[in-house]
């Protein structure tokens, strides 16, 4: 106990460690207790952070910052409009069609499930299979209807959509345009003796920037390749399944395994155990292999390597705290923890 007390006193004697600890606690408390209220602001900060890399690229081409910000912002708005006006209606229609076809798909799969008692009588009985089919049918139908009625059915949802549609683009533009003013204002109010915090932030900033931008491009590339492949092979609901595969890369390891189930089920219900089914699954597995072994190393070559166990623990922990945002930022947050741990001994040596 004395050793712990001495270590604590030694660490807290360093003002840089005190400031870093307070900053981390304030960050955690701020996100936990104000994340829902300030969600448009936080989303705008994340988007502006993503777009800042493009702005800096245009500035390296000798273009002034304000014109660079305007160009990037206009491209961002056009990208959002394309998604909202072209992709979202298509995804909604395909989701509606899939939900409406769930009973027919279950009826088609019922014949295959009823063979289980004949093949494995010691594991399955006919009554158990019928109960399982009824349970799956009820749950999937209810879940599908819930998705369809979730969109703009309530006034609260409509107001939230309008707030995001108006506030987020405006805030993104202001964060990009006034970035230097905002950062200078923050720096003037921080302690001058903060080299340790600057060291941690410098490492985290590089890794988070590379990770988020790389993940964005990975989602787009995987989605586009899957959409083209699924359409070329005439798979039903190709756009919806391609979006699911693209979004699955947000969750390393787990996402790819989970999204394989709906792709395989839709292909099986459409073709059965025929050649098109096996050709599509082969193409899908090739895409997954190229993503993991070629695309990811190219996009994330500068990101600090983190052990797969640490990634899974980070996904479970931060996802439990902050939901989808926590899952998306699990690796950057794990990088933050790693940066703090690696910087902490150096500060102790500095004290000695």
Image: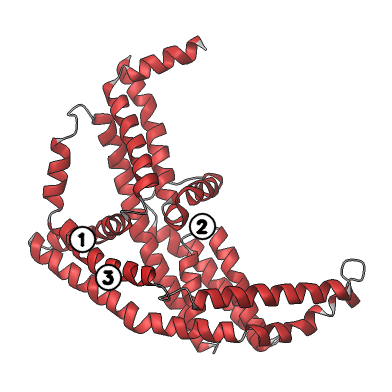
Horizontally, residue 111 falls left or right of residue 312, namely right
Between marks 3 and 1, how big is the CA–CA gap?
A: 11 Å
Which numbered marker is on residue 216? Answer: none
Horizontally, residue 171 falls left or right of residue 280, namely left
- First along the sequence among labels 2 and 3: 3
Instruction: Where is residue 99? Give x, y as percent.
Output: 57, 82
Residue 104, placed above or below residue 170: below
Badge 3 crowding class, 10 Å Cα cut-off, few under 14, some 14 to 19, many 20 or more, is few
Between marks 2 and 3, how big is the CA–CA gap?
A: 30 Å
Badge 2 crowding class, 10 Å Cα cut-off, few under 14, some 14 to 19, many 20 or more, is some
Please report the residue visible at 28 percent of the width from the left and 28 percent of the height from the top.
19
Tell me the mark number nearer the camera, choosing from 2 and 3.
3
Tell me the mark number nearer the camera, choosing from 2 and 1.
1
Can you identify the residue that label 3 sits on? 165
Please report the residue visible at 51 percent of the width from the left and 46 percent of the height from the top.
317
Q: Nearer the viewer, residue 261 or 318?
A: 318
Can you identify the residue that label 2 sits on? 252
Which numbered marker is on residue 171? Answer: 1
Please report the residue visible at 36 percent of the width from the left and 35 percent of the height from the top.
25
Badge 1 crowding class, 10 Å Cα cut-off, few under 14, some 14 to 19, many 20 or more, is many
Residue 261 in view here: yes
Q: Quadrant of residue 38?
A: bottom left
């Amino acid at each position: 106990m004395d050793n712990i007390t001495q270590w604590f006193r030694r660490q807290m004697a360093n003002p840089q460690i005190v400031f870093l600890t307070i900053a981390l606690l304030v960050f955690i408390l701020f996100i936990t207790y104000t994340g829902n209220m300030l969600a448009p602001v936080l989303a705008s900060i994340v988007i502006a952070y993503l777009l800042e890399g493009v702005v800096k690229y245009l500035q390296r081409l000798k273009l002034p910052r304000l014109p660079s910000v305007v160009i990037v912002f206009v491209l961002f708005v056009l990208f959002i409009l394309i998604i909202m006006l072209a992709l979202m209606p298509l995804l909604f229609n395909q989701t509606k069609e899939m939900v409406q076809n769930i009973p027919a798909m279950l009826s088609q799969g019922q014949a295959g499930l009823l063979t289980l008692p004949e093949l494995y009588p010691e594991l399955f009985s006919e009554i158990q299979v019928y109960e399982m089919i009824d349970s799956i049918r009820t749950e999937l139908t209810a879940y599908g209807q819930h998705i369809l009625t979730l969109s703009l059915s309530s006034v609260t949802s409509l107001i939230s959509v309008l707030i995001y549609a108006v506030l987020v683009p405006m805030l993104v533009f202001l964060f990009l345009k006034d970035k230097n003013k905002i950062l200078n204002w923050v720096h003037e109010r921080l302690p001058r003796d903060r080299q340790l915090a600057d060291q941690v932030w410098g490492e985290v900033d590089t890794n988070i920037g590379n990770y988020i931008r790389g993940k964005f491009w990975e989602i787009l590339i995987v989605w586009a390749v899957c959409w083209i492949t699924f359409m070329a092979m005439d798979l039903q609901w190709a756009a919806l399944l391609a979006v699911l595969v693209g979004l699955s890369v947000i969750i390393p390891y787990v996402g790819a395994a989970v999204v394989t189930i709906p792709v395989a089920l839709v292909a099986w219900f459409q073709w059965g155990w025929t050649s098109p089914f096996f050709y599509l699954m082969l193409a899908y597995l090739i895409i997954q292999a190229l993503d993991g072994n070629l695309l990811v190393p190219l996009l994330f070559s500068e990101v600090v390597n983190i052990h797969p166990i640490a990634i899974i623990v980070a996904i479970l922990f931060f996802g439990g705290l902050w939901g989808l945002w926590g899952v998306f930022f699990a690796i950057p947050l794990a990088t933050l923890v790693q940066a703090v741990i690696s910087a902490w001994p150096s500060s102790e040596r500095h004290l000695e």
